[in-house]
Structure formats: structure tokens, C-alpha cells
Image (cartoon, rainbow, N blue to C red):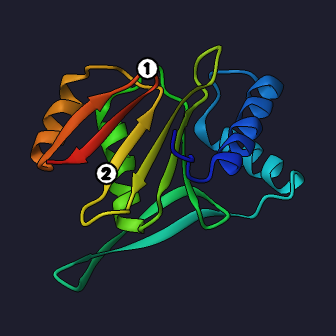
Amino acid sequence: MSKLIHNNLSHKVLGVAFKVHNSIGCGLHESAYEEAFCIELASAGVRYSRQHVFPIYYSGQYISSYIADVVVDNAIIVELKSVRELNPVMFAKIINYLKLSKLQVGLFINFHSTRVEWRRFVISRGGERPFIRMDCFYLGNPFLKLRASRLGCTLGFTAHECIISPQ
């Protein structure tokens, strides 16, 4: 079994999310969760950057930027949501954010429900082309199959994750 990238830090960040959710409950606006989440990160002694700006380049030229909700320890992008229903476009965005930022791990955390919903995305850059691993998600999602095929990749499934790897 391979070593998970930033596993301990991911667990710490998820612990912070669970603590926030247990304290203030579900269904509030995203900004309330972001504020509480950052307070808890600071209280836990975890370095973070809020509303972190990443530039976007096309053909070597700056074209725009995107703003990540939170970047933890310059290692993990955290996207916080408080939405009734998760959709595949949200997952595609975090994959794009990881590719653009050159970071390897992303956490998608949704506070809307009575239980915290989360997804962990990992881009491994060991070979020529990266592969993407997503933990705890919809197995067999047709949107992900389409996204993988457009990237020139194949999908593989295990009990807890999807691995998108180059063909």
C-alpha cells in the first residue's frame, strides 16, 4: 500500500472541519464556516492562508487568477461549501485548482448537511503525466468518466477511491 500524501495534515484539517460543524451546526452561510474554520486552524497551530490567490497562465502569459478559500501549510487547498447538493462540476474545479496551483492535495468540505461531507483529491506527479486520486466519492459517476476521457486518462476503482491515470 502506498503512503498517502499529506495524510496527517489532511486528518488534522478534517478534524478542524468536524469540530466547527459540531460547534455551530449545519445550514449556515459559507462565510460563517470559513471564519470558524480559520479560527480553529489558528487555535490548532496550523499555518494557513485565507482567500489565497493563484495566478493562471496561458501560453506563458498571465490571463487571470483564482482564489482558493484556504490553503493549509502551503500543501493543501481547502474548498469550503455550504450547499444542499454536491455536483460533479465542483469536483472538476478542485482538480483544475490543483493542477493550476501545482499543489498535490485538495479537500472539498461541505457543511450544509447534518454530517460534514468531504472529498479528498490527490494529484501524484511521479511520472511524466500526473494521475488524480479522489477518495470518498461517487463510484461510477458518468461525469468523471467523461472528464477522464477528455484528459486522455482511464478510471480505476478501489473500495475507497477513484484513480484517474494516464493511458
**Where does residue 38 sit, x and y in percent of width and height?**
74, 52
Q: Residue at x 47, y 63 (%)?
A: 103
Judged from the image, the secondary structure of the residue bearing numbered disc 1 is: loop
Q: CA distance from mark 2 to mark 1?
A: 18 Å
Judged from the image, the secondary structure of the residue bearing numbered disc 2 is: strand
Left or right of 110 on screen, residue 143: left
Left or right of 143 on screen, residue 120: right
- Amino acid at circle 1: Ala
Q: Which mark is residue 136?
A: none
Query: Looking at the image, is 70 positioned above or below residue 137?
Result: below
Q: Residue at x 63, y 44 (%)?
A: 31
Residue wearing tag 1:
159
User: Residue lying furthest front in this view?
Assistant: 1
**Where does residue 74 sit, x and y in percent of width and height?**
61, 67
**Where does residue 46 sit, x and y in percent of width and height?**
79, 58
For the question of whether residue 123 can be seen, the reply is yes
Query: Looking at the image, is 91 positioned above or below residue 94?
Result: above
Left or right of 82 on screen, residue 98: left
Left or right of 8 on screen, residue 110: left
User: Residue lying furthest top in this view?
Assistant: 114
Between residues 64 and 140, which one lies in front from this camera angle? Answer: 140
Query: Looking at the image, is 79 positioned above or below residue 136?
Result: below
- Amino acid at circle 2: Phe
Please tell me in which quadrant of the rendered image residue 145 appears. top left
